[in-house]
Image (cartoon, coloured by chain):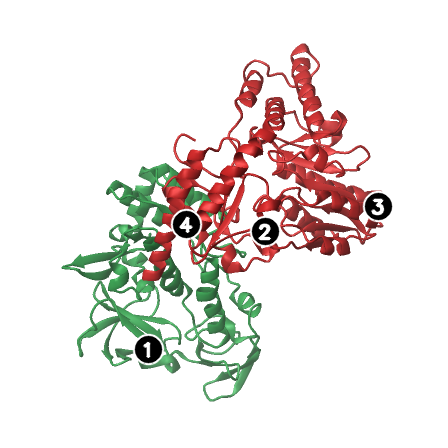
Chain colours: A red, B green
Amino acid sequence: MSDGVYLDHAASTPMRPAAIAAMEPYLVSEFGNSSGSHRAAAAAKAALEEARDSIAALLGASPHEVVFTGGGTEADNLAVKGAARAARAGSGGAGGHANVVTARFEHKGVLASCDRLAAEGFSVTRVGAGLDGVVALDELADAIGPDTVVVSVMLVNNEVGTIQPLAEIVELTRARAPHAVVHTDAVQAVPWVDVASLAAGADLVAISAHKFGGPKGVGALVVRRGTALEPLIEGGGQEGGLRSGSSNVAGVVAMAAALRVTVEERAADVCRIAPLRDRLVDGLLAAVPDSFENGERARKVAGNAHLGFRGVEAEALLVSLDARGIYAAAGSSCSSGATDPSHVLEAMGVPRADALSSVRFSLGFASTDADVDAALGIVPDAVARLRAAVAAA
Amino acid sequence: MSGGVDSSVAAALLVEAGYDVTGVTLKLWGGDSDSGCCSVSDVEDARRVAAQLGVPHYVFNFADDFTRDVVEPYVDAYATGLTPNPCVECNRSVKFGRLLERAAALGFDRVATGHHARVEATAGAYRLLRGADHAKDQSYVLYMLGQRELVRVLLPVGRLTKHEVRERAHALGLRTAAKPESMDVCFITRGDRAAFVGARATVPAGAIVDTSGAEIGRHAGIASFTIGQRRGVGIALGERRYVVDVDAASATVTVGTRDDLARGEVVVRDLRFVGDRPAAGQCVDVQTRAHGIPVPAHLVGNTIRFVDAQPRVAPGQVVALYDADALLGGGIAT
């Protein structure tokens, strides 16, 4: 970003130079369709499979378990809908009571998929979370039963950055619903935690390239061997029949390069970025009266900062910050671009007024001290001006 | 910027005039609406026009205010036999209320809309005039604006005819140049007012009576009726009938002839003026519908005395007062 201070890495990240370099040949000269039979096709296919091997290893999966998709939302849709429908079909349609359990703070890709399943006759249970930003394990345990076919809980929440107790969730599921499938949206987890080990017990793991320095429009779903899945997109049978369509070789190659760099540099990035985030949050909490943090800091990934400023409308603050070159986010941007009240904060039990005053600043591998300095210089003043205007009105 | 051609051209005119413009689309309603206003694709149209004009664009979510200040009063009104004016309430509370506040908080000097009316300033006093195209004049729905608002409002398209607005849009290559106008209440699927109100309030069925009180039919809910209404009365009678009264307490709709509707005056509440109150005895032009023909009257206290008898104004309707093209103010019929 040539101008402005980008503090919205949870929304998207700049591409890693290695990813851009890796994909360029596949945009320029290596344009063969990997599904073909001639040498040009074979070259593209080889690159695709090499990327698959690499991504699989980095995610703790075998290459046969990696399915490339058109992004994280698609991966979540494939996982949730695909597993539920396969389970129902597998039970001969007798699963009239088939149940899906998820959390109310999931990404819309998971929630909308669950809504669709509900319309198809599945029962869907959506459990809450605490003010700490962690899923309510007791509620989750109660919800999972013999009729449960899919349990979906994200590994890291996209708004408040909190890491969820996935190992416990897997354990709960195996105990209460041995035939159920565990899906985790790991989209926000990749830059910050060891997904391979934390999600080792999950049957379905979704990732999205543009959250870790790769291009938009490409992602992957780990589908553990033995997990039945009904495809969403059918056609030529690519990706083991689970996701037809000519492969996005350039995108996948870039995703593999980005993932490699991310995993290599993750520990160092976390070490460097966590103190930046702490300086930002502590600085804002100190400089702005009547401000608060959403989600428990100790349970968050290193780049997430989620703060509220009482008496200020987040929507107005974002406009003010945008005009002054600070790019942040609030709630969920719906398709219109309006700021809707955050369903995540609501799921956590944050009072509506506080939720409507809350903003997410998210740092990433490209963030610097200068970014934090700029935010500390501008945000308190922007808040103060809005509060003064409200008081004067 | 609603995504319509008027606000698109308004933005373009301001950019041309050298203003530092920011486009804003209001998200007011998340429900179903097929009237063509304020859907996600409308936001996209507004955003695209803003990009074409090179100005920033934001969406403000005022859905809570809209529900509370426009939709709920609308439902309450119909459920209690009154006739609401949702576009007026939206202007009052949201477009020239909330939005003016948000704009001021963000440091903007003015708010402009695509409304077809004109703001004129003479020696620090502001006047609101009808738009140049009388057939499209929207001053009626802006009757509530006073000096405090007008000092911060710009209405760029008021001096153009609708034809000129479209021509300007075409000339600028705006995506919205050929977009049809949105009619109807923006939050209700076409013609389904009774269902909308019925889903949100208890509207009991009742009797339709004539002016002598004799029952001549039944209705399924008073929300379907407005005083002065001619169609949909549902009764086959000799001459044309009109709704002359709606009584919520008894759920009774009274039907009569056009003569039964005639009134010499209407008492208004919440009377307000753009500038000074007109002098006692001054003859004013009164408009009781958004595109109604103005008729002469005199304002005495809160009573508007028509020179010639007029059909009864439905309680809840806005009554706007003019001096030729200048809007003087108005109130709500009781």
Are both tags, 1 and 4, on one chain? Answer: no
Q: CA separation, marks 2 and 4?
A: 26 Å
Seen at 58% across and 67% down, the residue is B199
Chain name for mark 1: B
For the residue pair A3 and A149, the one nearer the viewer reads as A3
Q: Earlier in the sequence, mark 2 or mark 4?
A: 4
Residue kind at label 3, given as amino acid type? Pro
Q: Name the residue tied to disc 4.
A: A287
State the quadrant of the N terminus of chain A. top left
Q: Name the residue tied to disc 1.
A: B268
Foreground label between 4 and 3: 4
Are both tags, 2 and 3, on one chain? Answer: yes
Q: Name the residue tied to disc 2.
A: A344
Res B225 seen here: no
Q: Position of residue B55 (x, y in %)?
A: 35, 40
Q: Is residue B192 left or right of residue A178?
A: left
Checking the image for residue A178, the label placed there is 3
Q: CA separation, marks 2 and 1?
A: 47 Å
Res A371 seen here: yes
Seen at 65% across and 50% down, the residue is A134
Mark 2–mark 3 CB contact (< 8 Å)? no
